[in-house]
Image: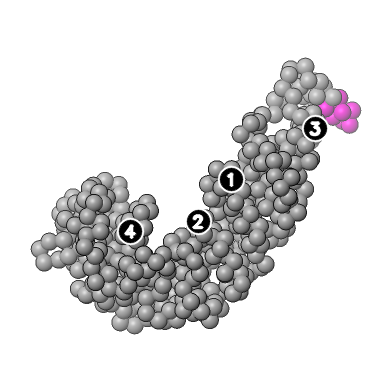
Amino acid sequence: MTAAAPLAAAQWLKRGGLARLVGVLDRDGEEARVVGGAVRNALLHLPVGEIDVATTALPQEVARRVTAAGWKAVPTGIEHGTVTVVIDSQPFEVTTLREDVETFGRKARVKFGRDWRADAQRRDFTINALSASAAGEVFDYVGGLDDIAARRVRFIGDPGQRIAEDYLRILRFFRFHAHFAVGAPDTAGLAACIRARAGLELLSRERVRMELVKLVVAPRAAATLWVMGETGILGTVLGGVPYVASFEKLAEREAALGLAADAPRRLGALVVAVREDAERLAQRLRLSNAETERLLALDGWWRVKPAAGEQAAHALLYRLGPQSFVDIVLVAWSRPQANTAEADAGWRALATLPQRWTVPTFPLKAAAFTRRGVPKGPALGAALRAAEAAWIAADFPLARAAVEAIAERAARAATAVC
């Protein structure tokens, strides 16, 4: 099935490196088309990001033509038919048409071919199996156009077989549903995911993390996570009890405050009740050090309350920094005990504090104490710490007299101990 040039006006098909690349590959007996997510997103009127190209040309011929055109050809997966072509610093994945000869888990033995239908049928979901010519003609061999129109994510062929080829497709099913679909998940696909959910334990932590961080920032992430929770899939992924209601509230707060969807913050709302939850998730998903630190900073969220006052909020913002401060406030605001309409104004004021108050720099250095007779070593460190604590307790004064008074008191206390 083809669609009569629904992308004929798509300028991204006709400009820049992509147009030149397709022009080189789509001639002299070979054919090349844009495939996958770029076509899907264009049909859904969403931004087009990474662009993949499929071709009938063998990898060696792709490399030859690309090199002759003066571009860089990188054999990133040449045994599976993939060459990454770099044109003006922009990478394009070019893959020769394939058919699976034998599949075993994520691995497959493939042969190269020239059959566009066979290549489409080996992909995961119908909306990802569309291809488009340089003229904008869309080719659909698996019902993807109907599913685009219905905003539905559906496996190609037998869902169980598709999942057995790669258990990550369970998470991809939910991730794509959260991003592109409306309504309930496809019944057959959902049932197959439930049956195969134990296979998620076989996946590498890095691959699970990659899918999960994309899922939690999707437009319909909360509704999708509810389904995953009810079917036992989410608990299998997280290794613990998910707090989907808190996640949903936090997503609403982000939107109300004009904040971008933030994956670490949303994972915190979904998972972290105590520090051990953050540690477990960091290990289970092999999170980066920065992501782990943000989750660990949520420890003690239950102590965060608007009623604690501005001075306490300043101290917390100073200790955590703006990003982690907003994280912990939004997580605390998302918990059931915080959800009263009367308190919302206070929570909003607390969450937006970094926009109104800039965290100051501690104005005292070691010299302020050594010239007061504090010797270098443990006593100097103790004086600095005591002075900083007193400065925080006084709500961060910057007037010279107030700062000098704090230094004097800390110095006297330190020298008295010496």
Which residue occupies the foreground of this view, 74 or 180?
A: 180
Mark whose residue sits in front, 3 or 4: 4
Task: Answer few, some or many: residues within 10 Å of disc 4's Cα (few below 14, many 20 plus, some between 14 and 19).
Answer: some
x, y percentage for residue 414? Answer: 84, 29
Q: Which residue is mark 1?
A: 256
**Residue type beneath disc 4:** Leu
The residue pinned by badge 4 equals 43
Farthest right residue in view = 416
In front: 111, or 145? 145
Q: Is residue 227 left or right of residue 79?
A: right
Whole-angstrom CA distance, mark 4 to mark 1, is: 29 Å
Q: Quadrant of the N terminus?
A: bottom left
Q: What residue would you read off at disc 2?
A: 219
The answer to whether residue 269 is above or below residue 396 is below
Let me know if residue 417 is in the magenta part: yes
Residue 191, percent from left and from top? 51, 79
Q: What residue is shown with label 3? A: 393
Q: Residue at x 46, y 79 (%)?
A: 188
Give the distance between the C-alpha atoms of the residues marked 4 and 2, in whole angstroms: 18 Å
Q: Earlier in the sequence, mark 4 or mark 1?
A: 4
Is label 1 in a helix, a strand or a loop?
helix
For the residues labelled 2 and 3, say whether their Cβ atoms are less than 8 Å apart: no
Q: Which residues are magenta?
A: 410-418
Q: Quadrant of residue 136?
A: bottom left
Give the left or right position of residue 205, taking residue 407 as reference: left
Determine the residue positioned at 43% across, 79% down. Answer: 159
